[in-house]
Image (cartoon, grey):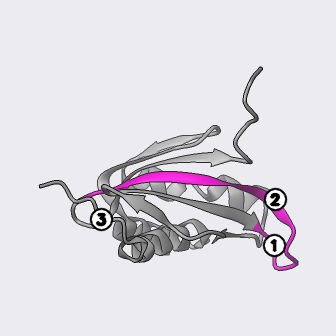
Amino acid sequence: MTDITTDPTTYVAVIDRYLAALNETDAAKRLELTRQAWTEDGGYFDPLQQAMGHDELASVPVMAHEQAPGQRFVRTSGIDAHHGIVRFEWELAGEDGAVTVAGVDVGIVADDGRLSRIAGFFGPIPERES
């Protein structure tokens, strides 16, 4: 039977590991956190980049660290979940609260509890076209 878990607390740990990896500036530590958060064949996709596998996934936050030094990714919402699919809002912000970018991630959690896919979206959902 398919898991239809809707209890978001089931997914807090993996999402927090994912964000910890995004925030880690030490490459070796980031790779280890990535391995804990993602399946070996995991894939990440956003408007600026895509990455497949642990080595590429560990490189995803490098651009953000270069363009917004000292800022951190923070989950700004609860986790909405069903059928192993999660979504949550996040921000990349400085200690002063200034937000560089915010968005929504939608992901798939594998049977082993790690992420297998994430699609990241920047900014609010566009208004409906006329």
Q: Residue furthest front?
A: 130
Left or right, 65 with reference to 106: right
**Residue 47, position as x, y percentages in the image:** 63, 37
Q: Nearer the viewer, mark 1 or mark 3?
A: 3
Q: Main secondary structure of the magenta part?
A: strand
Count residues near mark 2 (Cα–Cα under 10 Å), then give few for <14, some for 14-19, many for 20+: some
Depth check: give the residue in front, 130 or 74.
Answer: 130
Left or right, 22 with reference to 5: right
Q: Which residues are magenta?
A: 93-110
**Residue 81, position as x, y percentages in the image:** 42, 61
Alpha-carbon distance for marks 1 and 3? 34 Å
**Lower position in the chain sequence, tag 1 or tag 3:** 3
Mark identifier at residue 94: 1
Q: Which secondary structure, mark 3?
A: loop
**Residue 120, position as x, y percentages in the image:** 57, 48
Type of amino acid at the residue the image marks with label 3: Thr
Judge whether residue 106 is colored magenta.
yes
Answer above or below: position of 79 versus 104. Answer: below
Is residue 31 visible in the rendered structure shown here? yes
Q: Which residue is mark 2?
A: 100
- Which residue is pictured at 42% across the width and 71% down the height? 8
Mark identifier at residue 5: 3
Type of amino acid at the residue the image marks with label 1: Gly
Answer above or below: position of 55 versus 6. Answer: above
- Which residue is pictured at 36% across the width and 58% down the height? 82
Which image quadrant for residue 127?
A: top right
**Residue 15, position as x, y percentages in the image:** 47, 69
Count residues near mark 1 (Cα–Cα under 10 Å), then give few for <14, some for 14-19, many for 20+: some
Count residues near mark 3 (Cα–Cα under 10 Å), then give few for <14, some for 14-19, many for 20+: some
Q: Are marks 2 and 1 in contact (CB under 8 Å)?
A: yes
Is residue 28 visible in the rendered structure shown here? no
Q: Residue furthest top?
A: 130
